[in-house]
Image (cartoon, grey):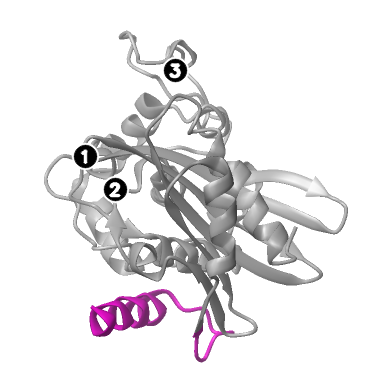
């Protein structure tokens, strides 16, 4: 198992490393477990400090395990939409289809920006259909996103599989976006950075996206992004099991507690 985990971590670093990180030291952070325990959830947390060449990890085994990216894939989906020109900018309205949706907030046409804010599934499914299966497959494989497998259903592969990604890989991907080191145009990455902005607090800026998927009948919650502080970038990814009402809100609570403990927030 240890050899397998090292291979997964090494593969993530090889596929997604930024130029600033010539080597990555894995630093286990068992003390972060108290934040998961306090919230009553199980999960993993990863923070990449690429400038220092360190990957801080709570629960190394789970951090290397791949899950569906769920709505965190909206980051990638938006980048592809902007790159391919299937949407002209972040404010163009995208139709949701006119059918009843799981959330009433999704039952309207909306822009890339508003669709990200309410995590609209139908709007981003429309963008994926416009981009098409082959272009989606090409970009997923070009970036080295997770297992690189999208199957044959262009508007469900990030929700139902086969696409899957680990917390380690999520952090490396976020690091590359923050550094604008992805094979997308500067404009698209700048727009996505602006859309993902969460906090503009004194001393730091935080950019992130939530996700809610399924893991064998158990809910899976993601929070993925990065913090910019004092000219440095700290990319992170958290995933937790969502077993009870109210667990979804704990994604940000636990991740923020971990970032604070690591003196990033």
Circle 3 crowding by C-alpha within 10 Å: few under 14, some 14–19, many from 20: many
Residue 180 in view:
no
Query: Which residue is painted at 72% across and 58% down in the image?
Result: 260
Quadrant location, the N terminus: bottom left
Image x and y of residue 211, in percent: 43, 40
> How far separated are the C-alphas under marks 3 and 1?
19 Å
Residue matched to label 1:
160
Region rendered in magenta = 1-25
Q: Is residue 258 above or below residue 209?
A: below
Residue matched to label 2:
68
Report helix, strand or loop for mark 3: helix
Whichever of labels 3 and 1 marks the residue nearer the N terminus, that label is: 3
Image x and y of residue 157, in percent: 22, 43
Dot in front, 3 or 2: 2
Look at the numbered discs 3 and 1 and tell me whether their residues touch, using CB distance below 8 Å: no
Residue 7 in view:
yes
Look at the numbered discs 2 and 1 and tell me whether their residues touch, using CB distance below 8 Å: yes
Circle 1 crowding by C-alpha within 10 Å: few under 14, some 14–19, many from 20: some
Image x and y of residue 37, in percent: 53, 49
Circle 2 crowding by C-alpha within 10 Å: few under 14, some 14–19, many from 20: many
Q: Is residue 217 above or below residue 133?
A: above
Look at the numbered discs 3 and 2 and tell me whether their residues touch, using CB distance below 8 Å: no
Whichever of labels 3 and 2 marks the residue nearer the N terminus, that label is: 2
Q: Which is nearer the eye, 251 or 192?
A: 251
On whether residue 139 falls in the magenta region, the answer is no
Q: For the stretch drawn in magenta, what is the main secondary structure?
A: helix
Using the image, tell me which numbered label, if any, was put on residue 106.
3
Quarter of the rendering containing residue 117 = top right
């Amino acid at each position: 198992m240890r050899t397998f985990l090292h291979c997964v971590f090494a593969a993530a670093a090889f596929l997604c490393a930024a130029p600033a990180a010539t080597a990555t030291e894995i630093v286990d952070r068992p003390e972060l477990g108290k934040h998961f325990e306090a919230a009553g959830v199980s999960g993993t947390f990863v923070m990449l400090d690429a400038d220092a060449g360190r990957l801080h990890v709570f629960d190394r085994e789970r951090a290397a395990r791949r899950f569906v990216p769920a709505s965190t894939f909206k980051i990638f989906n938006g980048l592809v939409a902007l790159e391919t020109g299937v949407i002209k900018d972040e404010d163009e309205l995208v139709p949701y289809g006119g059918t009843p949706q799981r959330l009433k907030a999704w039952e309207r046409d909306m822009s890339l920006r508003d669709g990200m804010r309410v995590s609209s599934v139908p709007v981003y499914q429309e963008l994926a259909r416009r981009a098409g299966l082959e272009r989606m497959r090409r970009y997923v494989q070009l970036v080295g996103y997770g297992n690189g497998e999208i199957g044959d259903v262009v508007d469900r592969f990030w929700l139902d599989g086969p696409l899957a990604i680990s917390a380690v890989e999520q952090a490396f991907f976020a690091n590359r976006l923050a550094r604008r080191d992805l094979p997308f145009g500067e404009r698209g990455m700048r727009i996505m950075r602006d859309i993902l902005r969460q906090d503009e607090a004194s001393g730091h800026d935080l950019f992130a996206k939530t996700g809610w998927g399924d893991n064998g009948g158990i809910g899976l919650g993601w929070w993925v992004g990065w913090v910019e502080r004092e000219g440095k970038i700290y990319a992170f990814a958290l995933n937790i099991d969502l077993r009870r009402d109210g667990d979804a809100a704990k994604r940000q609570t636990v991740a923020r507690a971990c970032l604070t403990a690591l003196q990033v927030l």
